[in-house]
Image (cartoon, rainbow, N blue to C red):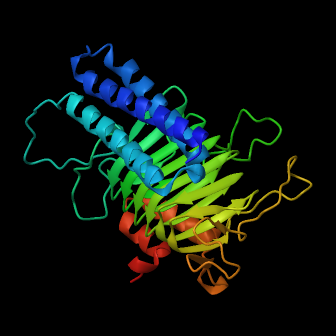
Amino acid sequence: MDSSSEQFYEKFQAERQALQTQIDSLSVLTTTERPSAIEQTLTRIARLNSEFNGVSSQLAGYDRKQCTGQLKSLSESLTRAQTKLSPKPRFSFKNRGSKTTKTAADTDSPGEGQGSGSGSTQVPLPAVTTSLHSTLLSSQTHAYLPLPTPSLPDIDIASLTSCIINLHPLPNSHDTSNPSRPRAHAVLTARELRESVAHLGEVTGPAHLTGIRGCALAVSCHQFRMHDSHDTIIYLRCASKPIIENCSGLRFAPWPFPTPSSGEDPNPRVDLWDQVEDFNWLKKQHSPHWSLLPEEERKGREVWEEVVTLGVDGDVEGGLKRLLPGKVE
């Protein structure tokens, strides 16, 4: 490890310890002090994660693995603290003769109460948390998660299992030059997704993905980095060569949504979606850790839109089966 990498690792460990101390102290704060402290903690975790992603390839393998696990532990620790400190719901009697239906307006967050048809309405909290600069969607199972409104430029999604995630924003009414074009995110971070379908939308900057397993993703970004991920399909549009590390079973396909023609797009860019660089494979032969998804297996825009519709209608399991090979009937 060179001196700069060693300095970063020491700085990382100091910040991690400070963040854990801050999370542990949330319980002694008043209810008025706690929200701002949580926002500050989320911002610091997001900043630390971004700094780590920028230098991870320069770190020794053991240190990189340590940092990845510690970032995950910090996010999980904050989620547990928020859940523990959330106000308990008031007890109320219900009329046994009436049937109630839970809607999005009755929940604290999007996706809560939407399942796969099993009848379970208990899902982990929180679903959506906002900090000063980013929106975090986390800790959900068998849920449909749309882009929150309003949302912040940076998007962070974490600890989601068997979910349909739709971060493709609605047309931006503030962009008078082209109001029909979706608003893009600035930075995207995705961690610990399992057997989920995620339409991650357009990202003007980097997309960092870690710990993705058995998923189908679609993202358009300037930079793409994926770590510690396996058995996942990525529909990608990328202005630079995608980078993978410690991955296996990845299959790439082109972005399935229409893109502006050169005459319509003021900033047209190249698309290097299929020129993947594997940091764990330095031989001239093609890396065994990734491949191109055969054309006959690629799903077009109509299928992705159908999956979103199924998610909105509450049939999450049905939507997952349309895009996840392991769930095909």
Q: Is residue 46 visible?
A: no
Say left or right for 31 vs 323: left
Compared to 23, does 107 lie above or below? Answer: below
In the rendered picture of this protein, how many numbered marks are placed on residues?
Answer: 0
Q: Is residue 238 visible?
A: yes
Q: What residue sits 31% from the left and 58% below the top?
A: 115
* Viewer-proximal residue among 21 and 329: 21
The x and y percentages for residue 216 are 51, 67
Say left or right for 128 vs 80: right
Q: What residue sits 33% from the left and 14% below the top?
A: 33
* Viewer-proximal residue among 202 and 37: 37
Where, quadrant-wise, is the C terminus in this rendering? bottom left
Residue farthest along the right direction in this orientation: 263
The x and y percentages for residue 318 are 40, 71
Say left or right for 297 vs 318: right
Compared to 177, does 249 lie above or below? Answer: below
Q: What residue sits 64% from the left and 61% below the top?
A: 243
The x and y percentages for residue 186 are 65, 40
User: Where is residue 290, by image quadrant?
Assistant: bottom right
Compared to 179, does 240 lie above or below? Answer: below
